Amino acid sequence: MSHSLRLRLLISVLALLLPAAAAAGVLLAQLFANRLLRDLDVALEEEAATVAALLQRPATGDMMELLEQIADETDLGVGKRIVVRRGNTVIGEVPSGSAAVLAAGGDSIRRATAVGGPAAAPLTVMVAVPATAALHATRRLELLLLIGVPASLVLLAAGLWLVMGRALRPLEIAAQRMEAIDASDLRPRVPLANPEDEVGRMVAALNRMLDRVAAAVAELQRFTADAAHELRTPLAVLRAGLEVTLARPRDAAAYRAALEEALGATERLADLAEDLLTLTRMEALPPNRPIAPLRLGEMLQELADAWAGRAAGQDIEIAVDADPAVEVHGAAPDLYRLFGNLIENSLRHTPAGGRITLVARVRNGRAEVRVTDTGSGIPPAELPRVFDRFYRARGEPGRGSGLGLSIARAIAHAHAGTLVLSNEERGGCSAVVSLPLVRRAA
């Protein structure tokens, strides 16, 4: 995988560099050739102006000697030609026949013209030289670029291949380590070489993801073990009761009692299965999903009325103090289940003569519902575990499924809310649910 990415990166870089290098090479050769020819033209112009200045009033013999002397100079290259005209008449040329050669023209010859002599009979001086040296230098540069640019790109590609291989090596190691991790052992982690660069941050994110996966798998394993344990007890009771009933013939009353006991165990199993399904459904729901607005005051009053009969049987008072304007977005059955579980939990741990208070207020821009009882509270050592699945606080293993508070918190989270349990200073327990308010347009 890393080699594939490495190759794609290299091809992408070369695809960008190759046209740019070719264009730069062509441009460089063109600029070099133009500069050489321009320098040669400037030098020829200066040479022609110098000759014209020297031929102000020359004698014919003196002029030819001067032209030959200048033509023999090699500062502008070999093959220099000089032609002097008065009007259209050639009065001097070095070497012989230069006027005809220059008249024939040719791209390989550079020339410059200057005017001198007396105003009555001015002289026109033309100095020319072959551009062979400049053309040869340009061809050498082109050849050098033709060989050097591909060679440089090859060297660059080799260097990039090595550098990218070293940069992508941690990814290759991470892929190998990830391949070695399976569900039976989630403890190995990907080694982190440099946490500051992009690869290091990605490897750190992978390790954090593995931590979350390991925690989720461990939680799932605990949940499966706890669910099997919780289901085993009522199933064992149900099976034992049926085996005892079928061990010998019985009268109708005995069979009826056994069937009622079996029905009770079946109902406990059904309640436990329903709690498990509810908990799974709540944990799978996304937060902030679109749901209907609900008035918490009306809901809490309905719940207080629904639980009033059981509370009266335990000599416990349920009081409601709710702001009628407090509204939240929620699914009514789920929120009824949330607050019903909290009321049931308070009833289970509040002694006779106690009181349960349901308060709904707006606090810090959110709806806050507080369910407070006058029981003995939660032992501090058990507070961190009260939301664990199948955990029964206060040492009462035979009462409830141990999922009530877990379901309540899952419902709160599914509604983008929170649930916190704490002990009151004057005794008793307080459960605080915080939910987003309904935002009304002005």
Image (spheres, rainbow, N blue to C red):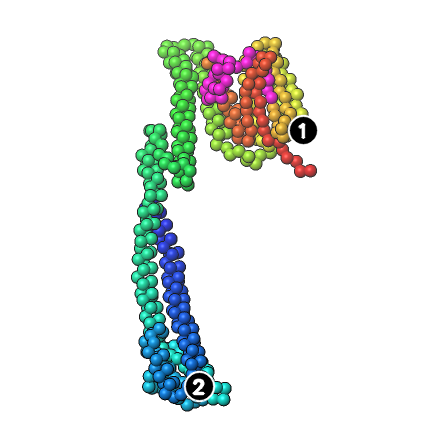
Q: Residue 333 occupies which quadrant of the picture?
A: top right
Disc 2 residue type (three-letter):
Arg
119 to the left or right of 20: right
* Magenta run includes residue 379: yes
Q: Residue 361 occupies which quadrant of the picture?
A: top right
> Quick check: 318 above or below 184?
above
> Quick check: 70 above or below 370?
below
* Magenta span of residues: 370-395
Q: Position of residue 426 (x, y in %)?
A: 60, 12
Q: Residue at x 40, y 78 (%)?
A: 111
121 to the left or right of 350: left
Which numbered disc flags the more N-terminal residue, 1 or 2? 2
Q: Position of residue 249 (x, y in %)?
A: 38, 10
Identify the disc placed on residue 227.
none
Q: Is residue 140 visible?
A: yes
Residue hosting label 2: 57
Q: Which image quadrant: the C terminus?
A: top right
23 or 343, which lies in front? 23
> Quick check: 394 above or below 167?
above
Q: Residue at x 60, y 21 (%)?
A: 370
Q: Which image quadrant: the N terminus?
A: top left
Q: How many marks?
A: 2
Q: Residues within 10 Å of mark 1 (few under 14, many from 20)?
A: few
Single out the residue that lies furthest toward the bottom: 89
Q: Position of residue 275 (x, y in %)?
A: 48, 24
Pointers 1 and 2 in contact (C-beta within 8 Å): no
Residue hosting label 1: 325
Disc 1 residue type (three-letter):
Ala
Distance (Cα) linking label 1 and label 2: 117 Å
Classify mark 1: helix, strand or loop: loop
Q: Position of residue 35 (x, y in %)?
A: 41, 68
